[in-house]
Image (cartoon, grey):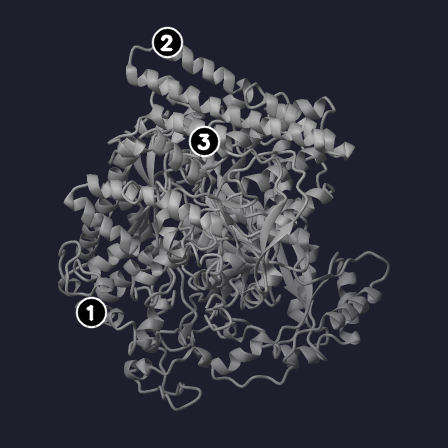
Amino acid sequence: MIATQEVPLQEVKLAPALRALREAYFQAIPEVCVERPRLITKFSVEAGLFERERITVLEKARLYRRVLQHRTPVVWHKQGHKRTATGLEEFSFDDSSPFAGSTTSKFKGVPIYPEFMALALWPELWTMSRRQSNPYYISEEEIQALNLEVFPFWMDHNITELARARGTEEDRRRMQLLQKFVFFLASKPNCISHTIPDFSRAVREGLRAVINDALERQERSTDQRQQDFYQAMAEVLEGIIAYAHNLADAAAGMATRATDAKQKAHLTEIAKIYGRVPEQPARTFREGLTTIWLCWTAIHLENPNVGLSLGRLDQVLYDLYRRDIDAGRMTVEDAVQLLGYVWLKIGDHVPMVPAAGEQLFGGTGSNQAITIGGVDSEGHNAVNELTYVMLRAIELMKLRDPNLNARYYPGVNGKDYLRRLCEANVNTGATPALHNDRAVIRALTASGHTVAQARDYGVIGCVEPGSNGRFYGHSGAILLNLPSALELTLFNGRHRHFGLDNVISMETGDPYTFQSFAEFQGAFNLQLHWVLDQAIALNELFGRIHQQFYPTPILSALFEGPMESGKDLIEGGATLNASGIAIIGFADVVDSLNVIEKLVYGQQPSDNTLFRAIAKNYEGYEALLARVRNPEKVPRFGADEVNGEKNAIWLTEVLHEATHTRRNYRGGYYRVGYWSMTNHAGFGRFIGATPNGRKDGENFSSGLTPCSGVTPHMTAALHAVANLPAECISNGMAVNLKFTPDDGDRTRMLDNFTAAVAGYFDASADHGTGGMEIQFNVTSHRDFIEAVKDPSRYDQLLVRVSGYTAYFKDLNPQMQKEIIDRTEYRLSSGDAVPYEPFALTKGADHDN
Amino acid sequence: MPIAVARTKPRESRRPLIVDIRRGSLDDGPGIRSVVFFKGCPLRCVFCHSPETQEICPEIAFTEERCIHCGSCVKACPQAALDLSSPTRIGRDRCDLCGACEDACPTSALRIVGKYWPVDSLVELLLRDVSFYRHSGGGVTLSGGECTLFPEYVETLLLKLKALGVHVAIETSGWFDYEVFAKKILPFLDLIFFDLKLMGADESRRYLGQSNEKILENLRRLLAEPRRAGRVEVRPRVPLIPDITDTRMNLSRVVNRLYDLGASTLSVLPYNPLGLAVYSRLGKPAPHLSTSFTKPDREAELVDTVRSLIAGDRWRPRRGQI
């Protein structure tokens, strides 16, 4: 593929109709959709699935096919609900999107999965439309539907109960641990998701060809299970085609009733396209997008969407784009508008978060990543015109979802391209995230990808890399609260959150009696393994439950591997398999280890004052608190002192060693990454004062970002991060950098921005790979403070949390504080702006 | 890693001391740079904006805003030179700069200014940012103080940096031994920021503490150096000190002299009062100078003044760093 110069896109703006729809999108609050749970429950009852000890892939496929056939085809949404001073109120708007259909029956819907976690919403059905933060609209009729027709059926048949009934005594104890949120979160009770489907075949050949392939293979196969699996694939794809045809019929019906000639033509065009794709090969860019969009809605039938990602759309769709442009059928401007409409469609659903989950996940979207740029599987420059067009569409729309990730291969991709990516960050304040191909490819080849597969990586969910369309890696399977392992070490197997009377894990010795830091490290390693053991055992248990009850024929039909292997993804059918662990609280643990090494065991004799201080939350130990927080006194991760990096590297290696040797229920490996979503704020609530000077309940630092206030020089912080071994970080990393927008010289600011990123990607490149990932917030401190005070004025303010983007107003106060407190660098001087922790006050706490 | 300086009496050590190393700087030459601030200066400009770099020997500084009154320093001091009730904290007549209080102070309110860095450690630190230099057209800037006071050390340092192709700039007061400078330092430089402050000999003695003859002579020789393939660039700068250097008379003489010497550019540096706060930290009286930065309109006016003084359009006076 040949890279082209950037087209003159700066002048392209959103068309008025798209702009209006985008405004409606921002006004609309999410609405609970009961269509899916109603149909799923009804058909499950009819098929007798509640009596099964196991649900086969074919049974699942027939169920989904019926749902697809019976769901209401909504061409355009005209109504939503918005927030007013007195409550929620219905409003109307014009929708003339070229893309019909939706994930739910609503304009912006909350899909409900009673077979997974939706019963958590049961007690809140009457109150959730009135809750202060992130309310959901639901009508009384819909509440009754869930109350009577849906939830009662699943009380003993949701995944948690199935696992409880099938797990061992030990498993049930682990599930209790899980429910405390203190050590880890396991996401399989909610979903697997977190992967990138392969759309290239559906786009290029059409679903009919895939069905035919499956049926031919079914005939050739002699294995009953394989035959069933191929049949299952055919069933679900027929279901998707049926949904497309229903939409086509609905659009045709609307066309006949339409009085406006333009609208009539528009609807006729939709009917024509939906009659053709996704069944047949896509011939135009718009058809290609339609195929992807319809497949996308179908996949959400199987699992809640968490981090399900679209992959390298600028590669998958480039040929169609090129042909349309070259043939004069489409202008660049048309392409930007089409993408704008698709982005709105992709964001047409939000994950269900019950009130209790707001603390941990408030403000999070589905984190649907799109990847652009980088190299192709042969290592050639893959940046093309569509790369820039997608970037422009993202820049104009400024949405939370999709989450744009840009790849950059130093030396292969052009510097102009990198500069353009930086400019987009200045323009949007928060996107795209940037990934260094050299580091990512090294990380992936070190953990099972071939070089060609690694080069063809896409970004999943927040920041996790995996080969596009062939890697089933549940990259967010486990979110590990790393400081909890430190807690167990410090308190000899006990945890302050549960009281210090009970041993939670095992006794590894009282740190007061240790003779050396090595002894402390040894104990920490044991406790860390214990936490990992619990999390992984639970992941395996839920993985097996997924195999027994939740096969995924739709996703399998849109993936590389299952067709060849004749196995569902959940059985290990993908070309590449893995389970991913996200480590939360890395910088806090590294800094704590540094402090313990120097101030406790580095003294002659050992000085246990620090242990006493953290037990008292540093009260009465103000001088010691000041010392451990002072980067001049103790090596801190990110201050780029030799000793600060030693423990950081040790920790990444220990975590890698402890995980990559284990195999999961699908035959894949475990891998670790460093990103935290909003959990560095959520998990922090359960951990008392830590040796790095963090007080009880305070936030951890996000992702792999050094702690705030310890890294006065930007290049030092970036160098320290780049020095970590990429091979040990195959599940991705998130490094957050906050820049103060400069009012002055924009050219110079962009020069510095670009050079900082290029320098980071090449830092330590003589012995390593350079930094792997970096993401930005380019919003001034003042604007953040104003946004806390007056959220309504900043309702579209987009921020990077850790990995994904969110609207600032949706975040809970603790998370808002974390973002405000992040180290902020001036692009004019490169120095950190003096650090003053933001106080959570009444004004900030707008949720209470 | 910095190694604490030998705790000897002042003025016995001529090992170069470093006050600060600032990484990721965008204001001290082109691109992203690391700036090394040397300690010791032959001038005593009354308007010095980094007084901690004047003395060549280590000093102790007390930053009151950082003090949390924990008293750790009082307990640690073997000379009983510290007093929590005294606003200046340090009895400087008793202090022998042993550094015990610095170690004891948790907030770095007390610190020894000036640390010796072995060249190899300094090089290792500076090279950590080499990728940032390369991508930004940046490099290393030696500032001070006056780095030319340490020709042997600087030569060794620059040999190592230039071997790896790092762009090197210095910021100098111009008061140095030309022969030594030309032999040890000049061959490695890419850029010289050369500060010209005052043209009158009497004024110079009064405000700079030295006659300016040597400075002007050094600038003349520097500009007359055969340009070896145009490698080193000399950028004269004049700091705009209210009522001292920013008079029309002085600026006119600066411009005329530079014209005569064949300089091609002149930069002006807006006045920066941040140095004033440092005097009290060092236990020194602060000079009576303006406490506000040069206002943008005043700066524009001065740039216009300089421009009007320049015959024809031979010159391009610029602001601060280029």
Residue A377, percent from left and from top? 48, 25
Q: Quadrant of the N terminus of chain A?
A: top right
* Crowdedness near tag 3: few (<14), some (14–19) or many (≥20) residues, C-alpha within 10 Å: many
Q: Which residue is mark 2?
A: A219
Picture coordinates of residue A47, whole percent (x, y): 34, 28
> Badges 2 and 1: C-beta atoms under 8 Å apart?
no
Task: Classify 10 Å Cα crowding around label 1: few (below 14), some (14-19), many (20 and above).
Answer: some
Residue at image mark 1: A608
Looking at the image, residue A395 sits to the left or right of residue A645; the answer is right
Q: How many marks?
A: 3
Is residue B126 at least partly visible in the picture?
no
Q: State the mark number for residue A198.
A: none
Estimate the spatial distance between the alpha carbons at disc 2 and disc 3, rounded to whole Å: 27 Å
Tell me if I can see residue A257 in this picture: yes
Amino acid type, label 2: Glu
Q: CA distance from mark 2 to mark 1?
A: 72 Å
Q: Position of residue A63 (x, y in %)?
A: 39, 29
Give the structural element (helix, strand or loop) at label 3: helix
Q: Are marks 3 and 1 in contact (CB under 8 Å)?
A: no
The chain under label 1 reads A
Separation of residues labelled 3 and 1 (CA atoms) = 63 Å
Location of mark 3 (residue): A67
Earlier in the chain: of badge 2 and badge 1, it is 2
Please tell me which of labels 3 and 1 falls first in the chain: 3
Dividing the picture into quadrants, the one containing residue A96 is top right
Q: Chain of mark 3?
A: A
Marks 2, 3: nearer the viewer: 3
